[in-house]
């Protein structure tokens, strides 16, 4: 009886732990990544530097255009605070795709963004482009950003490398 | 005896199939992703459009700066052929980081690039920047590109949204 119990429990364990390895990733797990993406946007729109940085993994990086890669909380806080300090800064992004590894510990989101700010003369400078974010599930179950990258869809100014 | 055989085989199966889920991803699997990244660079450096496009997943996308996202083999072939047709086009990239899901079906590579081409006057225009690539393991074991994104580290020209 005990042996049978061990067999059954072992089988339950096998099924529960390996299910995502054989089939498709669950909708629930994809939803968790999409929810993290949406919660991150809220932190950005509240212009909350601390909350925005907190979405990054300890070894997370921002790969923004026209500046070197920023890795680690200090560099990320500086980059994000710099953006939030721009006059009239506004950012919204639109999630289009969510993907997950079968083990549901690594995922990616991607989509489009619209941003704007006011230059020194008060003129509104608008941009539209795309983003790609790689998410890593932490030991506590939270999804954190390993890499966040974006770039513009708009043509480059003459003489700027495309 | 048969039951015992079933239990032992079940346990072997459990260990073999779930090993990557509990521990670190294997160095061998990371090497396979790094090797795909290096082979892709070779195809680029040979300016072989067909081979370069073949590294993409059927639903793969290129997220290049200053142009909308390109998804699918036709759009990718057009984008890559356009780059290769630039006078004096040269590209090299340097892999810095490789990451993998525990299920070893989804990975990412990232690093830096240096590129150059000659403008209409024959002047060499150089760029240096960073890239992020998301790789998906295919049913046949080959690693293919789901997303490839890059942007410049150089300052934007005045008036261009950063």
Image (tube, coloured by chain):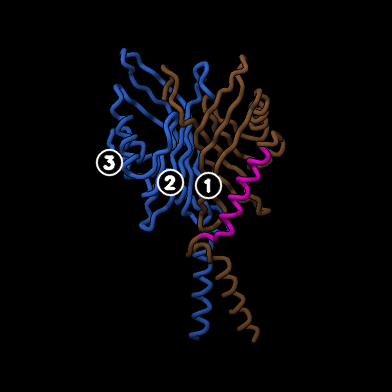
Chain colours: A brown, B blue
Q: Count residues near mark 1 (Cα–Cα under 10 Å), then give few for <14, some for 14-19, many for 20+.
A: many
For this rendering, which residue is in front, A116 or B12?
A: A116
Q: Position of residue B132 (x, y in %)?
A: 48, 38
Q: Position of residue A57 (x, y in %)?
A: 63, 42
**Secondary structure category for the residue under label 2:** strand
Respond whether the residues carrying marks 2 and 3 are from the same subunit.
yes
Mark nearer the N terminus (2 vs 3): 3
Query: Which numbered disc covers residue A154?
Result: none
Q: Looking at the picture, does residue B132 appear above or below residue B135?
A: above
Label 3: which secondary element: helix
Mark drawn on residue B50:
3
* Position of A18 relative to B9 (above/below): above
Task: Kindly give the residue lying farthest to the front in the view shown.
Answer: A123
A42 magenta-colored: yes
Q: Quadrant of residue B75?
A: top left
Q: Is the stretch drawn in magenta largely helix, strand or loop?
A: helix
Instruction: Measure the alpha-carbon separation of dots 3 and 1.
Output: 27 Å
Q: Which residues are magenta?
A: A25-44
- Find disc 2 in the rendering and name its residue: B146
Instruction: Kindly identify which chain the residue marked by label 1 belongs to.
Output: A
Residue occupied by mark 1 = A108
């Amino acid at each position: 009886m005990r042996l049978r119990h061990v067999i059954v429990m072992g089988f339950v364990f096998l099924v529960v732990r390996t299910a995502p390895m054989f089939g498709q990733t669950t909708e629930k797990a994809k939803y968790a990544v999409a929810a993290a993406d949406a919660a991150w946007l809220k932190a950005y729109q509240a212009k909350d530097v601390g909350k925005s940085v907190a979405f990054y993994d300890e070894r997370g990086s921002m790969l923004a255009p026209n500046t070197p890669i920023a890795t680690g909380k200090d560099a990320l806080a500086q980059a994000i605070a710099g953006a939030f300090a721009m006059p009239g800064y506004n950012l919204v992004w639109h999630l289009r795709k969510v993907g997950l590894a079968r083990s549901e510990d690594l995922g990616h989101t991607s989509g489009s963004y619209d941003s704007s700010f006011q230059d020194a003369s008060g003129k509104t400078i608008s941009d539209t482009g795309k983003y790609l974010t790689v998410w890593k599930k932490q030991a506590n179950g939270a999804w954190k950003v390993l890499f966040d990258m974006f770039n513009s869809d708009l043509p480059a100014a003459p003489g700027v490398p495309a």
